[in-house]
Amino acid sequence: MAKTEEISNIATPTVGAESLAPNVDGDLSLVMQVQQGEVACFDKLVVKYRQRLFSVIYNLTANREDTADLVQETFIKAFRSIGRFKRNSSFFTWLYRIGVNTTLSFLKKNKARRFFSFERIDEEACRDDVLEVLSSKSLADKPTFLKELQEKLNEALQKLSNKHRTIVVLFEIDGLSHKEIASIMKCSEGTVRSRLHYAKRQLQGFLSEFLR
Amino acid sequence: MMSNFNENSEKREERVTLDDLLQLKRYERPPEDFWDDFEVVVKERALQSVVTKKTWFKALLSAISRSWALRLSSGLGLAGVIIFCVVLFHPNNSLMEEGNSITVESGDDSRKDNVIEGEAPDEVKFIDVELALADSQTVGDKVEFIEVTLTLNESKVAEFDTVLSSNDLPDDTSDFVTYAGANVSTVLAESESHDPSGSL
């Protein structure tokens, strides 16, 4: 009982995860148009979801070149099988599932790959007060600090198993709900919560030097 | 999100949590020019991927089997026409004398039953052909008619094949893309036999 409460507390997002969920209005209409042969409508879906998909896959692979290939591959697979999309789930859930499957298969085949390339943190979007709290240094040192922090974050994420990392990325970084993640990973919400709890406990250990 | 962070950070007197660290990952983005032409490349690759090019041995097998099928069907058709003509123009043929009814002038009753029950579908087929050729009286016309019919049937098969493969196209990406774009609804329906969003 106590363990259940602990899991539930840790798994509750500190920010409104719902606000990060994609606006899926109009997706089904676009999908139907593509299914009828209007290829141009698929471009709209690509533009809408490419950044989010990039973010998820990048945080799973920690490599920009691999991510670029995998994002393209995901959209190509989605295009090839869009005729079979039955609208039982939302398009973005279906697309994410293809992306996550493709990435996890890639990671299984390429276990030896362990080099990281970093995307820059969008400093305009990321307000300085966040970094001030984290660094307690003058903002002149910000680039150095950011690089160090990125390295440690990526290293810590890569130490997790693929399934645990996927859940952390989808929940903490992409802001999806437990229900959406359960649908993408085809497991129960309870499994999502327990994996998230376990993964965050591991991350806390890996990043203890930054947690003050 | 940031206001939540500010409130939380004030309350905690600058205490940093794991969530704060992970939220930084949300701001990691590729430069804007990374997305230049992205959807164009995806579209080209996607269209190219639905057009399959046969390997040389498959193309060879297909050509051989098609050639054999053509010869066999032509031969059978020709043989059918010859048998039909022999039966039709034979001086003692009852069909010529008594219209379309089937009669057996000699033999026992059991043989008569077999002929009526067993051969009726073939007779119907030839009579259909004959009806379509009511104005054509020469054997040459009938042979030509059968050959044209066989050729037309073969061309239907050929048209169906070209939807799925592109052996006639040069190895030029833009041609694949144009081809797939023009046939996209058919190609999408035929491609990808399994669901890529399967279980993890």
Image (cartoon, rainbow, N blue to C red):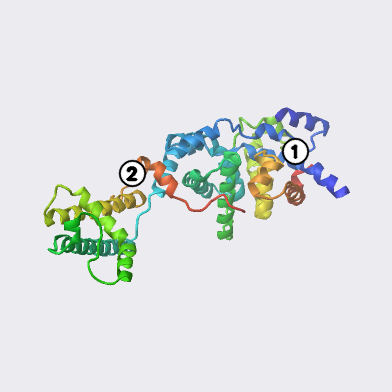
| A38, A109: nearer the viewer | A38
Please give the chain letter of the residue carrying mark 1.
A
Label 1 secondary element: loop
Q: Can residue B44 be seen in this snapshot?
A: no
- The residue to which callout 1 is attached is A13
Q: Determine if marks 2 and 1 fall on one subunit.
A: no
Instruction: Tell me residue A189's x, y (percent).
Output: 73, 46
Mark-to-mark CA distance, 2 and 1: 49 Å
The residue located at (48%, 37%) in the rendering is: B35
Circle 1: residue type: Pro
State the residue at coordinates (28%, 55%): B124
Q: Quadrant of the C terminus of chain A?
A: top right
Image location of residue B118, percent across then percent down:
33, 64
- Residue name at image x 61 percent, y 49 percent: A60
Q: Is residue B49 left or right of residue B26?
A: left
Which callout, 2 or 1, points to the residue nearer the camera? 2
Going 19% across and 56% down the picture, which residue do you hit?
Answer: B98
Three-letter amino acid code at disc 2? Tyr
**Mark 1 residue crowding within 10 angstroms, few (<14) / some (14–19) / many (20+):** some
Check disc 2 and report the residue beneath it.
Answer: B179
Query: Visible in this render: residue B93?
Result: yes
Q: Which secondary structure, mark 2? A: helix
